[in-house]
Image: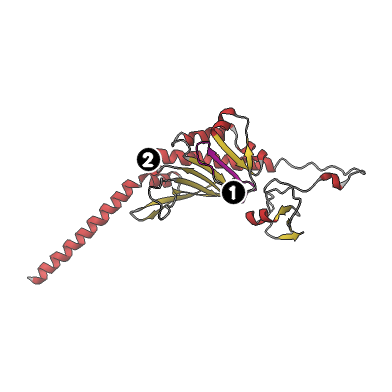
Amino acid sequence: MELVIFSLVVLLIYLVIRLLSSLGAWVSGSRYRAYRQLATLYRGRYESRGLSDPPTVSFFHAGSTVRVGLAPTITGQPQQIPRTRVVARFGRGIPFRLELAPIARPAPPQPPKGTRLVKLGDPAFDRAFIVQANDLEMARDFLSPQVRWTIGNLQRMVHAGGMLVSINPERLLVQIDRNLGQSSEALAAAVREALVIHDGLLDGVSRRMNQGIDIVDQPDDWDDEDAGPPICKVCGEPITAGAVIVCAACNTPHHRDCWEYVGACSIYGCNGKVGVTES
């Protein structure tokens, strides 16, 4: 008799565990359905992080590794706004830095190092957004009418000031200050718009770098001193004083701080990692 009761108790515990497991899987699948559908849409990888933490989705697109999910919360800061992020890490670095945010978004204490304010000549866009970049012409080429329209679409998905676009030589970040994982349509739309920005960025950089350089004969009366100081390709400022690092591969000069900030040569396609210090 005792053996029968013990067997029934064990069976009951087993059934309860199976029920709770199935319920947890159902809740998780229902709660994060938008991420699962996104992974299916882009043939990506759905990565679960438990019942309490939202999952992430990663996939490949045009040579970049794309990761979608919520930004991590900061311990000790209550009432944090959920922030959906699309991060694309480039397969090959680009010589470009840009920060773009709505005019209503609080500005950082200092602008990103080596960047300057960019005006596109589009009155509506220039009034609505602040753009800072290290290469003004590359920024204007990248921010085509299609990309500007896409950025406007992202802004319309959230409150005023609730989005930003950040680009550095290694990655593109598109952030929406809203939990888009609650809606399959909203999450898919944000990722679709982020990929338009990604493709426009790579196309714009490629066009700028493929414009070529005209090689002309040096005239007999050429005076090197009239050429002026070299320009750092990272910050766009003349190299007039202080330590200089010259790329050992292509001989391009950089400010030492700018070289250390990027960690490599800034010339697209060079990939030089070794710099020679000159005083």
- Locate the N terminus and report the quarter of the image it occupies: bottom left
Identify which residue is drawn at 60% across, 47% down: 112
**Closer to the N terminus: mark 2 or mark 1?**
1
Quadrant of the image occupied by residue 134: top right
Identify which residue is drawn at 48% across, 46% down: 86
- Identify the residue position indicated by label 1 in the image: 168
Asked if one can make out residue 271 in the rendered structure from this viewpoint, the answer is no
| x then y, percent, for residue 228 | 81, 46
Identify which residue is drawn at 71% across, 53% down: 254
Asked if one can make out residue 88 in the rendered structure from this viewpoint, the answer is yes
Instruction: Identify the magenta region.
Output: 92-107
| x then y, percent, for residue 95 | 65, 48
Q: Amino acid at mark 2?
A: Ser
| x then y, percent, for residue 66 | 50, 48
- Locate the C terminus and report the quarter of the image it occupies: bottom right
Residue at the far right: name it.
220
Q: Amino acid at mark 1?
A: Asn
Q: Is residue 196 left or right of residue 269?
A: left
Residue 43 among those drawn in magenta: no
